[in-house]
């Protein structure tokens, strides 16, 4: 079995920063693309950022220049550094990872609330 566990969410004021982490554990031989998605109340889940095993990154237009995705392959962990946070960034953030080139796994989600 494989598990993804996110951490680092919370309440932050507009303009603030948070760093999310997602650690994969279990029967893992390789991890291909890892990514962060988010879902706000009443909205569909949307892509935030992805990173391949080689380090190639993609970002949603709404977060470019503010968010940075990175990964530590030795720790099977992906990070999302979020700066200049806005109220519109409020959502449950989920990580996803393609494990063993077999299937995608999702974490349980972590709440990020941006409010004064």
Image (spheres, helix red, strand yellow):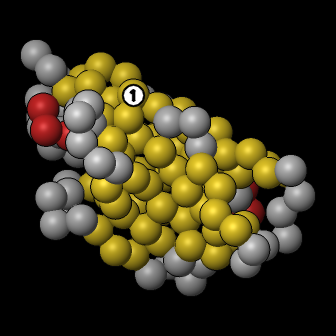
Q: Quadrant of residue 16?
A: top left
Local secondary structure at mark 1: strand
Residue shown at 70% from the left, 68% from the top: 103
Residue 59 percent location from the top left of the image: 29, 68
Give the residue pinned by disc 1. Answer: 111
Q: Quadrant of residue 67?
A: bottom left
On screen, residue 84 versus residue 98, left or right, reads: left
Q: Quadrant of residue 92?
A: top left
Residue shown at 85% from the left, 70% from the top: 29
On screen, residue 7 versus residue 82, left or right, reads: right
Quarter of the figure with the C terminus: top left
Residue 66 percent location from the top left of the image: 20, 55
Residue 39 percent location from the top left of the image: 33, 42
On screen, residue 93 versus residue 34, left or right, reads: left
**Can the viewer see residue 82?**
no
Q: Is residue 90 above or below residue 81?
A: above
Badge 1: residue crowd in 10 Å (few <14, some 14–19, many ≥20):
some
Closer to the camera in the image, 39 or 76 = 39
Closer to the camera in the image, 34 or 16 = 34
Residue shown at 40% from the left, 41% from the top: 93
């Amino acid at each position: 079995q494989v598990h993804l566990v996110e951490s680092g969410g919370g309440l932050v004021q507009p303009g603030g920063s948070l760093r999310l982490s997602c650690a994969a554990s279990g029967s893992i031989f390789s991890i291909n693309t890892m990514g962060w998605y988010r879902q706000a109340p009443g909205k569909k889940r949307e892509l935030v950022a992805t990173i391949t095993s080689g380090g190639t990154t993609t970002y949603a237009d709404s977060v470019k220049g503010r968010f940075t995705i990175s990964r530590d392959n030795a720790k099977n962990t992906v990070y999302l550094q979020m700066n200049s946070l806005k109220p519109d960034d409020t959502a449950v953030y989920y990580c996803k990872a393609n494990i063993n080139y077999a299937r995608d796994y999702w974490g349980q989600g972590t709440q990020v609330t941006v409010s004064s």
